[in-house]
Image: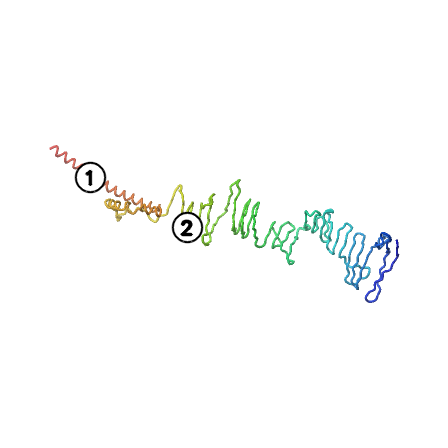
């Protein structure tokens, strides 16, 4: 093996001044190692360097015993100053690029990571990937503040805070998911627990909820709100009041369907209510019921009552006239006919008032007849006395 001791390297500067650097030893190998060149062949503790100078700009490759570095000097700083490290390979196989660290970060040889060179450690790395490709980890040192940011145009669009809250459109998320702006969900949303809505929520598809919903503002559903628990009955609790408001959009309505999809309860924009199989097109009354009604009582408002029959000025139709009317019309005077009831329905309030009116008229006729019967009885008694007196003579 050939060795050259204290070999002098001379580099000429642009000003003509010679700048010198001495290698402690430099040697070339022979035989099978003839392409191998060794700086510092005596294995002293001095660092070995290879410097490439172009005018005042230099790149230097150095062996610093614990790492190999590539340094850069943009201006001349003297041959003993290599400039700033821009890349290094550490003895454990990791690399550092300027302020960045690349390599194994305390997780074993099956992992490779990236971080700032001042944040080396199991808890402070920035990016970590597994050898088998199953895991890629983004990490932030636990500092009780700060976040992991995802940026567009150097502006945070999404952040993951130190406490684990995800923020979209905000850098200070105060919930596990904090969205500052409109959110569009085109699939199913499953919520296990209490959900508080502090603003408008719009659903354009299905929503499955297993838990409580508390809305302090508008709760808009443009799809289906499905209470699908088959184990227990669902419950809607209203603390103070519930206002169901319809808009004036044509055909706007509120309905409750039965198990077969037909309307069990229907309310239109005018406030008319239908219960049962009542066609919305024929909904003319405030309440329409298709079926029987069972109630413990019924009270109807009335502007008058047929006690006017007992007034002195009431024109009581004689029984002769009543008979003539019945013979001609086949119905009582003032009462709706069968044809009218079938066509228009039975007005219970009207018929009740008319029925009371006819009963009171019957009472007046009965009282009058009772007076006539009494007078006739007295007349019969007088006649019997007279007949008996004549017979006794």
Q: Residue furthest bottom?
A: 15
In the rendered structure, are the residues bearing label 1 and label 2 in contact, judged by CB atoms less than 8 Å apart? no
Dot 2: within a 10 Å radius of its alpha carbon, few (fewer than 14), some, or many (20 or more) residues?
few
What residue is pinned by disc 1? 376
User: Horizontally, is 162 left or right of 194 in the view?
Assistant: right
Who's the residue at 25% across and 43% down the image?
Answer: 365
Q: Residue at x 87, y 58 (%)?
A: 7
Numbered tag placed on residue 129 in the rendering: none
Nearer to us of marks 1 and 2 is 2
Question: Which residue position holds label 2?
Answer: 281
Q: Earlier in the sequence, mark 1 or mark 2?
A: 2
In the image, taking residue 351 as reference, residue 2 lies left or right, namely right
Q: CA distance from mark 1 to mark 2?
A: 63 Å
- Identify the residue at horizontal 84%, vertical 64% (top origin): 18
Q: Quadrant of residue 85?
A: bottom right
Q: Quadrant of the C terminus?
A: top left
Which residue occupies 47% across, 43% down?
A: 260
Q: Is residue 353 left or right of residue 140?
A: left
């Amino acid at each position: 093996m050939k060795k050259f001791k204290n070999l002098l390297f001379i580099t000429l500067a642009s000003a003509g001044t010679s700048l010198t650097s001495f290698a402690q030893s430099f040697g070339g190998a022979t035989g099978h190692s003839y392409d191998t060149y060794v700086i510092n062949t005596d294995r002293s503790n001095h660092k070995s360097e290879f410097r490439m100078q172009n005018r005042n700009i230099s790149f230097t490759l150095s062996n610093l015993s614990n790492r190999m570095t590539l340094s850069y000097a943009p201006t001349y700083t003297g041959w003993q100053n290599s400039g700033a490290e821009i890349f290094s390979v550490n003895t454990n196989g990791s690399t550092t690029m300027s302020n960045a660290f690349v390599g194994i970060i305390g997780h074993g040889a099956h992992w490779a990571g990236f971080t700032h060179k001042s944040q080396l450690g199991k808890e402070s790395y920035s990016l970590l990937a597994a050898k088998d490709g199953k895991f890629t980890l983004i990490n932030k040192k636990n500092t009780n503040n700060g976040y992991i940011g995802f940026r567009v145009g150097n502006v945070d669009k999404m952040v993951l805070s130190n406490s684990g809250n995800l923020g979209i459109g905000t850098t200070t998320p105060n919930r596990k998911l904090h969205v500052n702006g409109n959110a569009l969900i085109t699939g199913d949303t499953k919520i296990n627990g209490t959900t508080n809505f502090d603003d408008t929520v719009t659903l354009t598809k299905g929503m499955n909820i297993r838990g409580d919903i508390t809305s302090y503002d508008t709760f808009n559903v443009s799809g289906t709100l499905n209470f699908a628990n088959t184990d227990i009955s669902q419950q809607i609790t209203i603390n103070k009041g519930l206002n169901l408001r319809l808009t004036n959009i044509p055909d706007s309505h509120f309905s409750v369907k039965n198990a077969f999809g037909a309307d069990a309860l229907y309310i239109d924009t005018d406030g008319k209510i239908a219960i049962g199989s009542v066609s919305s097109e024929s909904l003319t009354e405030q309440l329409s019921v298709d079926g029987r009604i069972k109630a413990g009582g019924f009270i109807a408002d009335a502007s008058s009552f047929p006690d006017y029959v007992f007034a002195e000025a009431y024109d009581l139709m004689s029984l002769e006239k009543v008979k003539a009317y019945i013979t001609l019309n086949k119905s009582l005077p003032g009462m709706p006919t069968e044809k009218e009831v079938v066509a228009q329905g039975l007005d219970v309030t009207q018929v009740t008032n008319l029925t009371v009116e006819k009963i009171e008229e019957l009472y007046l006729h009965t009282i009058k007849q009772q007076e006539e019967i009494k007078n006739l009885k007295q007349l019969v008694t007088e006649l019997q006395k007279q007949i008996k007196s004549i017979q006794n003579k």
